Image (cartoon, rainbow, N blue to C red):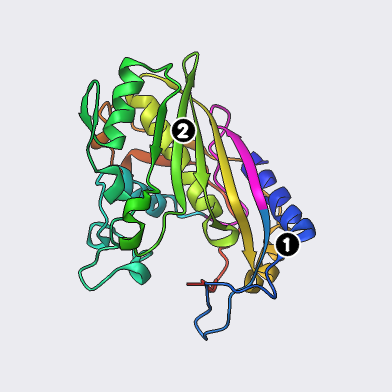
Amino acid sequence: MSKADNIFIEMCKDILANGAPSEGEVVRAKWDDGTPAHTIKKFCVVNRYDLSKEFPILTLRPTNLKAAIDELLWIWQKKSNNVKDLNSRIWDSWADENGTIGTAYGYQLGIKHKYKEGEFDQVDRVLYDLKHNPYSRRIITNIYNHYDLHSMNLYPCAYSMTFNVTGRKLNAILNQRSQDILVANNWNVSQYAILVHMLAQVSNLEVGEFVHVIADAHIYDRHISLINELIQRTPHPAPKLLVNPDIKDFYDFKVEDFVLEDYQSGDQIKKIPVAI
């Protein structure tokens, strides 16, 4: 049985049983029909995944890992803020007439900063430190740049990564200010687990623990019945992640370099409403 499924099931049960509803509060998000999209939430959910033991992808329903990796590469490798560089339509609702989402996500990772060791953008600084100073306690990225928030079409949700090497294992913490649990939870878990695999491989390290910290973990009102149905399903064994061992440069990775072996899952949930 997949540990990722167990973590997801217990998290959802906790939110539904002990979470705080937003009824009576002013909420930003709305459904397509203009109705306020209310939620039930838990503050500060922390989930831990040992990547050395399994790849944390849900088996309760399928996660489109290739599309998740494509978005990850769009942000971390291409450092793009234009949906024309993305092979899916998931960001279209936040794009302007030129296809840009403003000064958000990949744009922030691509800004160069001056350091004692030279000039790097945030991704290249991580790669430099993992190679030259892997036991540093300062290997952090942060794209929640207050100076540029006014020109972001969506404030970053997954905004900060902290990397820490223990022995030969690369560990990481993803900080997320907000998450739609049904739509995005395993999408983000899977893609940032992939990021840890990528960075570990090109830094001659092993994967360790991935910790996901969600400040506002919420289930939308129109998702509750879907979540209840989902967590009643029987999980399958976790699949095995195969990463192309020939890739030695972070910028050489492609979506095709990641393959899931023996990935079994339940049926996909059809027509999940998305609050904007």
Judge left or right: residue 127 versus residue 25.
left
Residue 48 percent across, percent down from the top left: 61, 36
Amino acid type of the residue tagged 1 in the rendering: Ala
Which of the 4 image quadrants contains residue 233?
bottom right
Calculate the distance from the C-alpha at mark 2 to the C-alpha at mark 1: 29 Å
Q: Main secondary structure of the magenta part?
A: loop
Please tell me which residue is depicted at 42% across the width and 54% down the height of the picture: 156
Name the residue beneath numbered marker 2. Answer: 162
Total labels: the figure holds 2
Which of the 4 image quadrants contains residue 110?
top left
Label number found at residue 20: 1
Residue 206 percent across, percent down from the top left: 45, 21
Residue 85 percent across, percent down from the top left: 23, 57
Q: Which residues are magenta?
A: 43-62
Please tell me which residue is depicted at 29% across the width and 29% down the height of the picture: 125
Outermost residue, front side: 147
Label number found at residue 211: none
Looking at the image, is mark 2 or mark 1 earlier in the sequence?
1
Judge left or right: residue 230 versus residue 123.
right
Please tell me which residue is depicted at 27% across the width and 26% down the height of the picture: 248
Which of the 4 image quadrants contains residue 270?
bottom right
